[in-house]
Amino acid sequence: MQSGEFFGFLGPNGAGKTTTINAIVGLARTNGGTIRIFGHDNRTQWREARRLIGLSPQEYNFDRYLSIRDVLIFAAGYYGLRGKAVIERADMLLERFGLTGHAHLEYTKLSGGQKRRLSLARALIHSPKLLILDEPTAGVDVELRIELWQWLRALNEDGLTIFLTTHYLEEAEELCKRIAIIRGGRIVTEKPTKELIADGASLQDVFLELVRSG
């Protein structure tokens, strides 16, 4: 994956997508190989590497006793960030994702779509260079999905590198410039999206052929 890229990482359930994400962010121990985040080894230079990553996981893991504004401020503290600048960035993100009116609420009071937006805001609180999204639009309605697409495109156009996993193949086809497909823990193809569907086949057709073959 290249700096500034919008990269799709696709595969069937159990193929290794979440395990790969866990390895990138340091939650899973690898048996071999090297993972570098903008030149930093994520094992020997883990502090530098993790500061560059923002993760929006598939499952919600917010502290239910904090207001959503404090969720963002607290998350910034993990990166050694605090003070007025963090508060201002938290308020900016809440406004950007349409959550300002809910800033005082606990996350349990939010709708599913609002929780997705909060997860994205939290992943961005420390201004990462790489944003990892694990099923970011799962369970949201079509209107919010399209709205999230617009936000993600804007973030990528501003220079943010995005790593996306999704089961919505039209989402990957719409957003990603390059796509890798994993099956059984092995990447079976990695190409620019336009090349994958160059012969007029849909991404769904290509995906099904690759995951069923061999």
Image: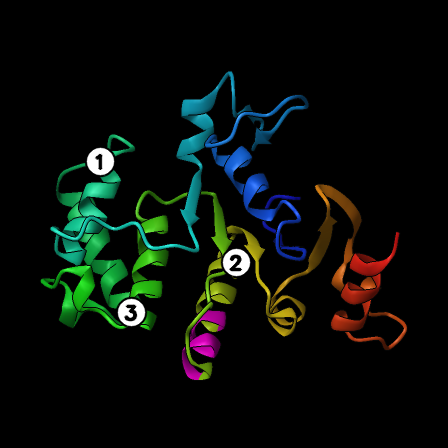
Q: Which mark is residue 114?
A: 3
Secondary structure, mark 1, is helix
Tag 1 near tag 2, CB within 8 Å: no
User: Is residue 174 positioned above or below 79 on the image?
Assistant: below
Residue 196, x across and y down, in percent: 82, 63
Residue 142 tag number: none
Residue extending furthest top? 44
Q: Earlier in the sequence, mark 1 or mark 3?
A: 1
Q: Amino acid at mark 3?
A: Gln
Along the horizontal axis of the image, is 113 left or right of 107? right
Q: Mostly what secondary structure, the magenta segment?
A: helix
Residue range (magenta): 143-149
* Quarter where residue 164 is shown: bottom right
Q: Is residue 15 magenta?
A: no
* Mark 1, residue position: 77
SS under mark 3: helix
Q: Mark 1 or 2 closer to N-term?
A: 1
> From mark 1 to mark 3, how far is it between C-alphas?
23 Å
